[in-house]
Image (cartoon, helix red, strand yellow):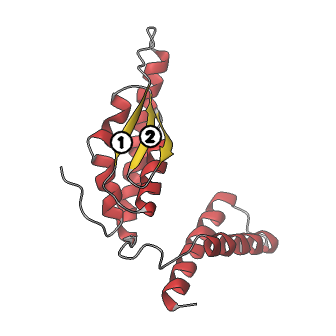
Amino acid sequence: MNSRFDRHLIYKALALFVIWLLLTESYSPAHVALGLAASFGVALVNTDAGRYPGVAIRWLQLLPFFPWLFGRILISGLHLSFLILHPKLPISPALVRYRTKLGHEPGIVLLGNSVTLTPGTVTADAQTDELIVHAMDDESLYDLQSLRLERKVADVFRTRTIAK
């Protein structure tokens, strides 16, 4: 193993282990050992440091990204609640092809997962340069079609900036 692979493996495993501890709230020795083993196992299966040359996560950019995404999830949830509770049910569902300029799988995965986590939209298919997104209405697609979400994802990685 090379040192870059080792570093990525350790960082991922520790991040997964912290998430495990926060979500389970159980600190018995058996549970901690199971969480540590599972975290390293998942990190080992999912770490391939040389697979995407020139693509690196800017870890400090994740700090503003996740609260922003959480806020968008809350706002979209309220919007979807309004649509559902409205007497006329003003939805206009559609499948939309969205071309992305991210150019690498980790960014497209983060983009597709962010779309799916946002109420009112689901990523139905993802390719190397395109997402197929199902949306309940046009407003649900705003962050995606305005390139706002893609720019935020591009900021997380050391990749080219998305033009406005």
Q: Residues within 10 Å of mark 1 (few under 14, many from 20)?
A: some
Residue 74: x and y in percent read 44, 39
Residue 9 at least partly seen? yes
Residue appearing at x 73%, y 63% in the figure: 26
Determine whether 162 is above or below 123 in the image. below
**Quadrant occupied by the N terminus:** bottom right
List the residue tagged with mark 1.
98
Q: Amino acid at mark 1?
A: Tyr
Q: Residues within 10 Å of mark 2 (few under 14, many from 20)?
A: some
How far apart marks 1 and 2 lie (CA) works out to: 6 Å
Q: Secondary structure at mark 2?
A: strand
Residue 117 at least partly seen? no
Query: Considering depth in this image, is 71 or 158 the residue closer to the camera?
Result: 158
Residue 104 vs residue 22: left or right?
Answer: left
List the residue tagged with mark 2.
132
Residue 37 vs residue 13: left or right?
Answer: right
Residue 21 vs residue 138: left or right?
Answer: right
How many dots with numbers?
2
Q: Earlier in the sequence, mark 1 or mark 2?
A: 1
Name, please, the residue furthest toward the right. Answer: 30
